[in-house]
């Protein structure tokens, strides 16, 4: 993925999160959880795009 596409995707996610935080009324605790989940997902996605994380398919639960 080219760097420009990565930066544009991060900007779009950031603006979308800002819009949700700004214009959708919700409790502060829910807003904090939503922000944390989005940040963790974006960090994992960036690590996968950069090739620093092999992906979640390597993890197996059970057998």
Image (cartoon, grey):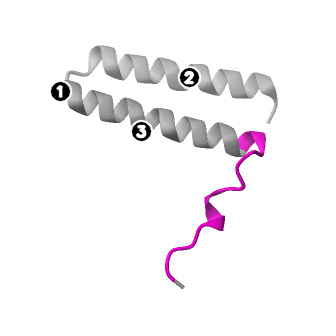
Q: CA distance from mark 1 to mark 3?
A: 16 Å
Residue annotated with mark 1: 27
Dot placed on the residue nearer the N-terminal end, 1 or 2: 2
Looking at the image, is mark 1 or mark 3 earlier in the sequence?
1
| Image position, residue 41 (x, y; %) | 52, 41
Q: Residue farthest to the right?
A: 2
- Please say if the residues under marks 2 and 3 sit with CB atoms less than 8 Å apart: no
Look at 45% across and 35% down and name the residue there: 38
* Magenta stretch in the rendered image: 49-62
Is residue 27 depicted above or below 60 in this figure? above
Q: Which residue is mark 2?
A: 12
- In the structure shown, which secondary structural element does the residue marked by tag 1 occupy? loop
Image depth: mark 2 or mark 3 in front: 3
Q: Is residue 33 above or below residue 19?
A: below
Q: Position of residue 59 (x, y in %)?
A: 60, 67
Horizontal arrangement in the rendering, residue 3 relative to residue 47 (left or right): right
Mark 2: secondary structure: helix
Up-down: is 27 above or below 45?
Answer: above
Q: Is residue 6 left or right of residue 16?
A: right
Q: Main secondary structure of the magenta part?
A: loop
Q: In the structure shown, which secondary structural element does the residue marked by tag 3 occupy?
A: helix
Determine which residue is flagged by label 3: 37
Which mark identifies residue 14? none
**Other-residue count near label 2 (Cα within 10 Å), few / some / many at <14 / 14–19 / ≥20:** few
- Position of residue 49 measured from the top left corner of the image (x, y, whole percent): 73, 41
């Amino acid at each position: 993925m080219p760097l420009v596409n990565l930066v544009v995707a991060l900007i779009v996610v950031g603006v979308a999160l800002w819009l949700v935080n700004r214009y959708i009324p919700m409790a502060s605790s829910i807003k904090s959880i939503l922000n944390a989940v989005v940040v963790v997902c974006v960090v994992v996605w960036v690590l996968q795009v950069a090739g620093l994380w092999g992906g979640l398919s390597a993890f197996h639960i059970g057998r």
